[in-house]
Image (tube, helix red, strand yellow):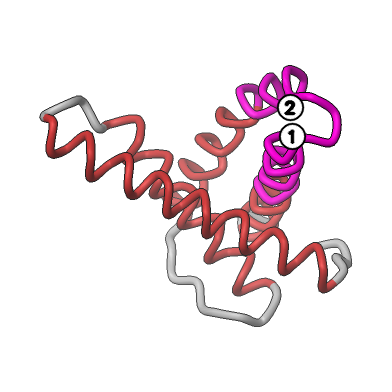
Amino acid sequence: MKNVSQEIQDMSIKSLESTLHKLSNAYNSMTEKGANTTLVKQRRNSVKVGLESLKDAWGRGDFFYDRENILTSKDILRGIMPSIEKQIAKAKEGSSQKTLNERRLIAIKLAIESLENRLK
């Protein structure tokens, strides 16, 4: 994996932790309401795999997922990117929402790169 500054590493981990927390809350809320949770569950699990892959790549954790989980997570994370890119395009320049989504996009791209490196 390419060299990434400590600042970007910290920002990416915080961003994915925040995303994981939000997806976990959404999953719990939807479960209570009896709504279909398939997509949220897949995204939550994929963000978790990506986060753990980054933490392991940067010496901050362990990674214990198999090839199938890595492939699935990578594909799901790729599928999330277009909606984040649309949100960035719609957000006002300098807004906190734009900054948050830009950081989230960077973190997801790094997570995908980290997962791809595990498949080599």
Q: Does residue 85 belong to the magenta stretch?
A: yes
Identify the residue at image location x=56%, y=38%: 77
Residue type beneath disc 1: Lys
- Quarter placement of the N terminus: bottom right
Residue type beneath disc 2: Ile
Write down the region rendered in magenta: 82-108
Query: Which one is in front, 3 or 29?
Result: 29
**Quarter of the figure with residue 109:** top right
Q: Are marks 2 and 1 in contact (CB under 8 Å)?
A: yes
Identify the residue at image location x=57%, y=55%: 16
Vertically, is 87 above or below 2? above
| Label at residue 71 | none
- Image check: 90 left or right of 71? right
Q: CA distance from mark 2 to mark 1?
A: 5 Å
Q: Residues within 10 Å of mark 2 (few under 14, many from 20)?
A: some
Query: Which one is in front, 52 or 115?
Result: 52
According to the picture, the residue beneath numbered tag 2 turns out to be 88
Q: Secondary structure at mark 1?
A: helix
Q: Residues within 10 Å of mark 1 (few under 14, many from 20)?
A: some
**Quarter of the figure with residue 90:** top right
Q: Secondary structure at mark 2?
A: helix
According to the picture, the residue beneath numbered tag 1 turns out to be 98
Q: At which x and y percent is residue 73? A: 49, 44
